[in-house]
Image (cartoon, rainbow, N blue to C red):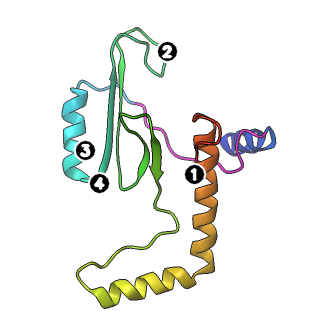
Amino acid sequence: LRCIDRCKELIRAGESYELCLTTRLTAEAEVDPLTLFGHLRELNPAPYGMFFEVPGLPGPDGKDGSGFAVLGSSPERFLRVDRAGVASCKPMKGTARRHLEDPALDEEAKHRLAESAKDQAENLMIVDLVRHDLSAVCEPASVR
């Protein structure tokens, strides 16, 4: 409940108008982080993965400077910055699964998505959130 109260405080302070509560897992392990990431990708071969290893800095618990690693696997691309510095996001909210093997079923899914007020509202909300987040770190008037 403290997390929910903190989220409400941040929303009232104007830091965000929607927050997603997730569960953080922090663990000490005697395993090579890259090997662990390889196992994660085998078990969950989602199209977007991330792996950051930061040696020499204190970990999230603030202990020694042995470093830490952050890894994950997701079906959606949260952020991409290309070599030209162009940032893009491809969230999945307000979308529908494609049925490329069955054009009729694919067309039906497209029609249901186009007619769904809930999915359209969700999509607009996510687009607005992405614009807001990118506008905080991108050149003024460059987000489209």
Secondary structure under the numbered disc 1 in the rendered image: loop
Between disc 4 and disc 2, whose residue precedes?
Answer: 4
Region of the chain picked out in magenta, as a range:
14-26
| Residue in front for this viewpoint, 78 or 134 | 134
Mark 2 Cα shell of 10 Å, populated few (<14), some (14-19), many (≥20)? few
Determine if residue 16 is in view.
yes
Examine the structure image and report whether residue 85 is included in the region drawn in magenta. Answer: no
**Measured from the top left, where is residue 90 in percent x and y?**
45, 54
Residue type at mark 2: give it.
Gly
Residue 21: % across, % down? 58, 47
In primary-sequence order, the first of circles 3 and 2 is 3
Label 4 to label 3: alpha-carbon separation: 10 Å
* Gap between marks 4 and 1 measured at Cα: 27 Å
Instruction: Of the two numbered discs 2 and 1 on the same chain, state the one appearing first in sequence.
Output: 2
Secondary structure at badge 2 equals loop
Residue at (58% x, 34% y) in the render: 137
In the rendered structure, are the residues bearing label 2 and label 1 in contact, judged by CB atoms less than 8 Å apart? Answer: no
Task: Point out the frontmost of discs 3 and 1.
Answer: 1
- Main secondary-structure element of the magenta-colored stretch: loop
Camera-nearest residue between 37 and 95: 95
Q: Position of residue 27 (x, y in %)?
A: 38, 30
Q: Which mark is residue 144?
A: 1
Residue 40's disc is 3
Rendered position, 58 above or below 107 = above
Query: What residue is disc 2 on?
Result: 62
Horizontally, residue 91 falls left or right of residue 37, namely right
Precedes in sequence: disc 4 or disc 1:
4
Tag 4: amino acid = Ala
Mark 4 or mark 2: which is in front? Answer: 4
Q: Which residue corresponds to mark 4?
A: 46
